[in-house]
Amino acid sequence: MAKNDKLENEIPEMEIDNKYSSKKPNVDNMNKAQKEAEKTKKEIEKLKSFIIKKFPYLEALSVLPPQAIPLFIEEEEVPKETAKAIHLNLIIPEEKIKEASKIKTEVVKEIEKLKQKIWLHIRTAAEIWEICSDSKFELISAIAMSFPLYDKGILGALRVAEIHKSLVVQKFDKYVVSYVLGGSLVRGEAAKTSDVDVFVIINDTDVKRMPRLELKERLRNMIYQYVAEASAMAGVKNKLEPQIYLLTDFWESVKDAHPVMFTFIRDGVPIYDRGTFMPWKALLKMGKLKPSPEAIDLFMSMGDKVIPGSKRTLLSDIFVNIFWGVTTPAQAILMLNGCPPPNAKKELVREFKKEFYETKMIEKKYIDFLDKVVNTWRDYEHEKIKEISGAEIDKFLKQTEDFIKRLKELRTQIEKKTNEETIERIYKDVFTLLKEVTGKRSQNEIIDTFEKTFVKKGQFSPQSLRILKDIIYAKLQFKKGKLNSHKVDNARKNAEILINDLVEYNQRCALVNEKK
């Protein structure tokens, strides 16, 4: 849903009556005109809020460009006196077409309250595509470039395509055969972030001096350069996805009944065409575009390949993910337990069994599963198995989920054990060294002596005392279960600083005693 942003200066300026015009600027008249414009904007904003609230299924609401109004007057038999009015364009879903008259009645009533000259146009997306199919490209351009008051996605997608088309046509002029919209935009599924699929067909029949492959690459690069420029100018998040075809290649694909081309011709709508795309579309509808016997054989054979091909895909893609998704965490757990990372295909099962099963830290079924995964991988690499069923993959996936869950539990066990050993070790190392400095005393006496005799007299920094107290606090917190691996590791790093300082101090004392 679009935000109900306040209208800026993009609303077309209203025509000023002759009585306000003058050869010389008149400040009063200018101020009055500005006030009228501000009033108009507020009233349009009020009307927009009413329409969105009343008809929440609305696809888009916009103000048509003033310079394009004569086109709509002539095309839709709109009264000529509306030339100076604001023309609002409403786009509604196809399934709401029966409510169009009701929508018009309700909105016109609201317009009458505003006392503004506003003319209403109501269309469905299908009617917009019909404008394209009728080659009324100026009309579709005006709708695409209308100022959006509200948009669920269709206007933004149309606008970025229209700008890109203009840049491409301006650059290549007569060589552009067709510029066609396709994908989610034409299917009525466009959102503010949808990709916009467009097909650009370039006439290459009179290009003599350049290889066709080189020509296609050059065209592709140049046309793609305009994508970012068009997106920036359109101010939308929709990503333009152009497909570039040479006319000769396109005809070759149509002749061979390429499914992409048939879908493109069937569903696509042109916003620029030199009289070629719509004849293709008509021929397809009449059944005149028929695949060759060779193409029929090719596409029929695809049905025979689908089952074995799918099984190979299950093996080559999904099972490969399972293998690495199982063996990599298993290696990580071994490393956490203090082992060097083993080779996944040769040593992993043996080391995993030794470290965890033989120490009764994990159950045998997980060793068996790991062994099965590794052996299946070996058979796959040596081409002993070439396909795998969906049922087997499902079983592997279920067992993988269980295995990973068990590894997470094992990680918690190992980390708790490792953290306990780390805390005990750094505590023991620190107090062993402190006793050499302060003498054999209780913990509290050691801390008190260390602070008064060594820290306050400048032989150790205040940081050393802080680290000592942090180590004692960390040991207490660990016993309460309030210390995680990250905090334990921080305690270890800080303890190393204190241990290095204590070792250095003891070495200095020993050196002094030797000299004496």
Image: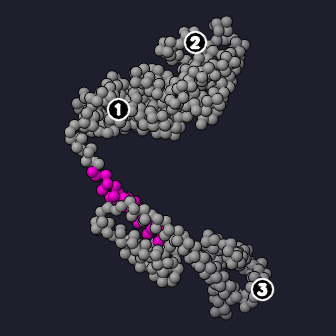
Residue occupying the point 66% across, 19% down: 109
Q: How far apart in space, not on screen, are marks 3 and 2 (Cα)?
A: 97 Å
**Disc 2 or 1, which lies upstream in sequence?**
2
Between 273 and 284, the residue placed more toward the observer is 284
Q: Residue at x 53, y 68 (%)?
A: 405
**Main SS of residues in magenta:** helix
Q: What mark, if any, has residue 322 been given in the picture?
A: none
Q: Which residues are magenta?
A: 304-330
Q: Amino acid at mark 2?
A: Thr
> Would you say residue 326 sits in the magenta stretch?
yes
| Tag 2 residue | 82
The image position of residue 13, as x and y in percent, is 61, 18
As displayed, is residue 496 above or below residue 392?
below
Q: Which mark is residue 265?
A: 1
Name the side, left or right, on which 282 lies relative to 332: left
State yes or no: residue 456 in magenta: no
